[in-house]
Amino acid sequence: MRVGLGFDLHKIRPTRNGFLLLGGVPIPAPFEVLAHSDGDILLHALSDAIFSALGLPDIGVLFPPGQKSTKGMDSKKILNRALAELKNRKKKLINVSCVVVLEKPRLTNFRESIRGSLAQLLGIKKDGIGLSAKSFEGLFPLANKAIACWVNCLIQ
Ligand code: MG
């Protein structure tokens, strides 16, 4: 058994008609994520957790930001690379445990759809997906300026 930890943080900025992508689920939000890729921070941290569990470099090394090839990239591609690395080593994912930190919107109503999306993307049962939503407690400088995410994974 191996454990992996992934972390990601992105700046956000106010936007009209904006949305956040979390675990492949578009979430209506008063913010948009500043990112070179599609900005799905949950998939970034999740992919990094898997790469880390395998002793591989992080996604910034494997998918360098600032390059044409990664501009606006669908983060599912990054995750699929991580899953391919798992499969190549004949290992499988047991469960993942995620913490997303942001001020708004509250994720309560989206929790089940994000868990369902992750379960489908990862090919594991939904009870193997833990998701906690926290806030920065209104504290400067991160509150309403950033979104952060941690993911642990266990592989076998
Ligand atoms: Mg990222």
Image (cartoon, rainbow, N blue to C red):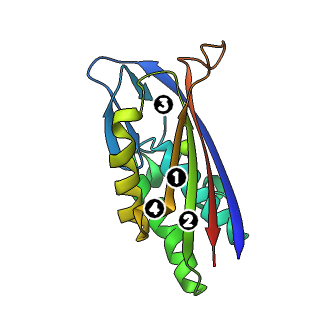
Quarter occupied by the C terminus: bottom right
Outermost residue toward the left? 17
Tell me how far mark 3 sits from mark 4, CA to CA. Answer: 31 Å
Q: Is mark 1 within 8 Å of ligand 1?
A: no
Marker disc for residue 130: 1
- Residues at badges 3 and 4 in contact (C-beta under 8 Å)? no
* Amino acid, disc 2: Asn
Q: Quadrant of ligand 1?
A: top right
Q: Position of residue 94 (x, y in %)?
A: 56, 71
| C-alpha distance separating marks 1 and 2 | 8 Å
Would you call the spot at circle 1 few (<14 residues within 10 Å), some (14-19), or many (20 or more)? some
Q: What secondary structure is found at the residue carrying circle 2? A: strand
Circle 3: residue type: Leu
User: Residue at 55% of width from left, 65% of height from top?
Assistant: 95
Q: Are marks 1 and 2 in contact (CB under 8 Å)?
A: yes
Question: At which x and y percent is residue 76?
Answer: 41, 58
Residue at numbered disc 4: 127
Q: Secondary structure at mark 1?
A: strand
Residue pointed to by mark 2: 95
The residue beneath circle 3 is 34
User: Going from the N terminus, do you reach mark 3 or mark 4 first?
Assistant: 3
Rendered residue at 61%/65% (across/down):
50
